[in-house]
Image: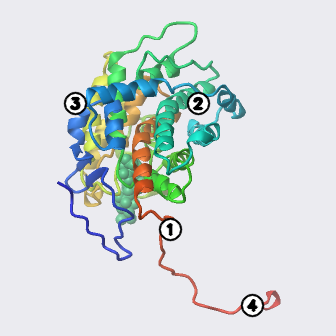
Amino acid sequence: ETGNVTLDIGFVNTASCTSAITYIDGDAGILRYRGYPIEQLAEKSSFLEVTYLLIHGELPTAEQLAAFDSRLRRHTLLHEDLKEFFGGFPRDAHPMPVLSSAVSALGTFYQDSLDPFDEEQVDLSTIRLLAKLPTIAAYAYKKSIGQPFLYPDNSLSVTENFLRMTFGFPAEPYDLDPDLVKALDLLLILHADHEQNCSTSTVRLVGSSQANLFASVSAGINALFGPLHGGANQAVLEMLSDIEADGGDVDAFVNKVKNREAGVKLMGFGHRVYKNYDPRAAIIKKTADTIINKDGVSDPLLDIALTLEQRALEDDYFVSRRLYPNVDFYTGLIYKAMGFPTKMFTVLFALGRLPGWIAQWREMIEDPQTKIGRPRQVYTGYTERDYVPVDAR
Ligand code: SDX
């Protein structure tokens, strides 16, 4: 069963592309990857399986999944020269520009797999990127705290390896917490694709010039960094911390937003498409309770978030503008409870979104209609006028 595609060619509502990967109904709060409801995938699948589904279009058989897993585990290592690359950044560099630079640099090590029209090369680049981005992300974090890098341990899954390379030390064994692995795997599933959002459209647009996969994804990472997009999960934590610093006065903050003081927004609320509850936010909120209160220690920021959400959901200013919690409202609290610093939150979003970027890039490249993506404009400037010499201005 496929949806009927109606393209309204008017400037107001022009679809930028057709795609068979992800379906969103913003009013009904529906999100499906290749036809499978996000709620079912969140409950029954794994990030590895969802990655395969998004890229290959079907859920894998047990043999296909095992082969995919084993191939990924063999590609987690970075070239030793690329490891030196991290030394060039200042210690307090934000990991997102480090990530986008390292992904772009990755392409220079693999001249043998850059041809976007060679299926084998695209497949090899896909595996390399999926396997190495977690290593790059962990190294960006270790660089920011001045700790030694850990080589990947391929007896672990990609998610487990990432946690170990991020939080482990060479001098001692790292005990994987199964609750942490499960929660991170779920969050990665929920971020895996989302139709033509800002960063995915960027990946498609850059790729439409036949730029290689590494260059296109590097551009997508930069788009995701923006605080109105992937950077929102970091901005939510900063917002909650500001409210806490102000004595937890949620009403005072809500009034600042309603009075539009200095462009203050309720971060983690609102969405270009979901004009109702973001289905991902509902799933994440359940996880937030288990992970954050796991050791019986609740986080005051979670209490502030719950109060803020309740307050906004009852306030006509937000309800009349159809502003509801989105995927970013609770994720930061979970990442914080897992031990990640706020600077790593958007990196985690990128790790989740990578399969979607790759699937959408491959779909665009395989589409014979693909030409240079060149959005048109409505010109609103001056009509023709003559040059005025400087002494007459
Ligand atoms: C992501 O596209 C995707 O799919 C993105 C994403 C994905 O998975 O890829 O879902 C991930 O980016 C989620 C969004 C994360 N960003 C934030 O949480 C930042 C805060 N949200 C806003 O910046 C905003 O809601 C947007 C940009 C996300 C969406 O804006 P809209 O819904 O297109 O609407 P708009 O900017 O035209 O605003 C409509 C009205 C305006 O008020 P008026 O001028 O009409 O009086 O709503 C107000 C806005 O001022 N408004 C907000 C608000 N968001 C919109 N007011 C206060 N707080 C907010 N968060």
**389 to 290, vertically: above or below:** below
Q: Quadrant of the C terminus?
A: bottom right
Image-quadrant location for residue 6? bottom left
- Residue depicted at 47% across the width and 69% down the height: 375
Residue under circle 4?
388
Q: Dot 2 lies on which element? A: helix
143 left or right of 235?
right
Q: Nearer the viewer, residue 346 or 121?
A: 121
Amino acid type shown at disc 1: Arg
**In the image, which is nearer the foreground, mark 1 or mark 2?**
1
SS for callout 3? helix
CB under 8 Å between discs 2 and 4: no
Whole-Å distance between the Cαs marked 2 and 4?
53 Å
Is 124 rendered above or below residue 197? above
The image quarter in which residue 186 lies = top left
Amino acid type, residue under disc 2 in the picture? Ala
Up/down of 206 relative to 278, above or below: below
The residue pinned by badge 1 equals: 374
> Which residue is situated farthest in the top direction here?
172
For marks 3 and 1, the one nearer the N-term is 3
Q: Position of residue 218 (x, y in %)?
A: 55, 45
User: Nearest the camera: 109 or 145?
Assistant: 109
Q: Which residue is mark 2?
A: 140
Task: Give the mark toward the camera: 2 or 4.
Answer: 2
Q: Is label 1's Cβ within 8 Å of ligand 1?
A: no
Q: Amino acid at mark 3?
A: Lys
First in sequence: mark 3 vs mark 2: 3
Element under disc 4: loop
Look at mark 3 in the image and give the residue it sits on: 44
Q: Could you give the CA–CA distance between mark 4 and mark 3, rounded to whole angstroms?
A: 69 Å
Spatial separation of the CA atoms under disc 3 and disc 1: 40 Å
Q: Earlier in the sequence, mark 4 or mark 3?
A: 3
